[in-house]
Image: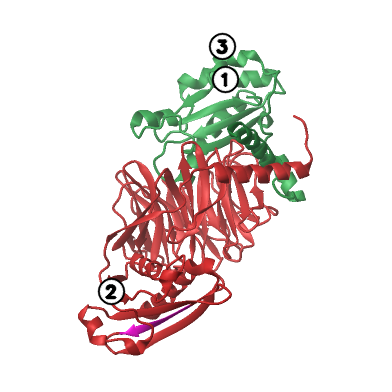
Amino acid sequence: MRTRSRQSSRHTFTLALLLWLISTPLQAALDIEIFGGGATQIPIAIAPFAGEEKLKQGITAVVAADLQRSGLFRLVDASGPVLRDPRQIVYPDWKNRGAAALVIGSTVVLPDGRVEVGFHLMDVAKQVQLTDHIMIVPADRLRAAAHQIADIIYEKLTGDVGVFSTRIAYVVKQGNKYALQVADADGFNAQSIIEYSEPIISPAWSPDGTQIAYVSFENKKPVVYVQTLATRARKAVANFKGSNSAPAWSPDGKKLAVVLSLQGGSQIFLVNADGSGLQRLSQSSGIDTEPNFSPDGQSIIFTSDRGGSPQIYRMPVTGTASGTAERLTFEGSYNVSPHHSRDGKSFVFIHRSGTRFNVAVQDLATRQVQLLTDSRFDESPSPAPNDKMILYATEVKGRGILAVVSSDGKTRQELSMQMGDVREPAWGPLPRVR
Amino acid sequence: MKKVISVLLIGLLSACASQTTQPTAEDKSAAQAAAPVAVADPNLNPILRDPNNILSKRSVYYDYDSFVVKNEYRPLVQAHAQYLRDNAGARVLLQGNADERGSREYNLALGQKRADSVRNAMTLSGAKDSQIEAVSLGEEKPRATGHDEASWAENRRTDIRYQGE
């Protein structure tokens, strides 16, 4: 094979990647269907934001869709005259419509092209304002502004942090093409991170949201890469003899747990985020895989068949006790894919009973288990950063799709691509600056 | 345009295999620790592809939940081990597979167990460990794409691939 200069190889890579992106007809947006309903939903009316008809991107519909998708809100009819000021509100009218909360807002295009977006959140029964907010954003950041507004409303009315400004990663397979994509949590603005004609699995967000680790089969074997989103630069952090997979970031972003067959079987190792400093963590003669760090970084939960069937275990990461594992799951013969909740008090996982694979949650203190889904082939559960929803992969009519279930199991929403199989979802972290 | 894309795609793949970013010292040594990626080798022995020779048979199949090389596949594995013994420069990549049911990463580990079973049988028959790399494709590259027992049985498999193919 003729050697070529490093410079031209990099140019070839960039050009080929660009051509891939231009020539690939992968559907960009996810469609979202909502099923079921939560037990108690807050009835909220979101009046159309004044002036938004002049904008390329409206605000009202995005806010409404976000709140409805959370399962905690029921949208109330908000038709009527445009409201710019709380003093214009006729409260009995909204009370008659059944609204407990009312949002009125307005948009103004400034001389420099930026848009000023403001809103008021009102308590209909008490006839008082709960909060208001004004922001000035570039015209191409209007969806982001709407998500921010939905976050503020959500937090004010539920007391929990909103996740509408977060992103999700997932893999799409169309024919023999695979793409790792990142989209807004509502499915919009999907962008391909990497695309190949070989499989990609196990995407994992770095804690600060700037990088994604994933497993690629482009070299005819699984290799773990870490890719920086802003620059598209990537590095193989685990490319040892045998198989390399299941990357999981430590909460401080400095290390990754990975699974290697380098020393026999499939065992868990720690490696620095730059690929240096390999250190073995698990010690069994069988399969230890799917590591996941606790939020305090002190322990990992993982899947192991050391007891004869795949179950979930926990072990300390540091100290002399490293390597000794405690079994956590005891129901059934197949419990895999554990992911801690962000508050560290529980973990979601996949539980098989009979021939069904379902999302379940176990409380670490009480050891109580609750099944959250009743479909057949659920995989890859990933909690939202507020632990109120879980993103997972499932199948409808033989096609892979993503779905979201509320943490109490009562509300479920399906996200479906127009084409192809979607799998391997990972919910990104809360944005650092809001 | 399509031809240009596929040529550049090959360039992309080979570029990615070697130099997508500034490689650090650790990156290079990690790449060296990995088995060499197959390159076109005009010297590959035609006996490996002769349909009348057992060496052209490259797949070992497994029972459900099993990772043991069944008796009916032992002659096949031993023939390849003998070839490796007789040809010190030969290298094989063993790719283990699992059927689609369950977690992808756990299935990757199951596929690894299958590839390891063939590697162990080969080294017991005298092949050198340095001639063999055992990896897993898990459920990601199924040969049979149905959702029934016949397809799943076809996918519980280890494939033997020689460097140069």
Mark 3 or mark 2, whichever is nearer to me = 2
Which span is picked out in magenta?
A117-123
- Can you identify the residue that label 3 sits on? B53
Relative placement, left or right, of A152 versus A323 is left
Q: Main secondary structure of the magenta part?
A: strand
Question: Is disc 1 in the same subunit as disc 3?
Answer: yes
SS category of the residue bearing label 2 = loop
Q: Colour of chain B?
A: green
Q: Which mark is residue B78?
A: 1
- Can you identify the residue that label 2 sits on? A79
Report which quarter residue A69 is drawn in: bottom left
SS category of the residue bearing label 3 = loop
Label 1 and label 3: CA atoms lie apart by 13 Å
Relative placement, left or right, of B155 versus A207 is left
Q: Colour of chain A?
A: red
Question: Is disc 3 in the same subunit as disc 2?
Answer: no
SS category of the residue bearing label 1 = helix
Q: Is residue A161 visible?
A: no
Label 2 and label 1: CA atoms lie apart by 78 Å
Placement of B110 over or under A390, stated as above or below: above
Callout 1, which amino acid? Answer: Gln
Callout 2, which amino acid? Answer: Ser
Along the line of sight, the residue nearer the viewer: A61 or A169: A61
Q: How many neighbours does mark 1 have within 10 angstroms: few (below 14), some (14-19), or many (20 or more)?
A: many
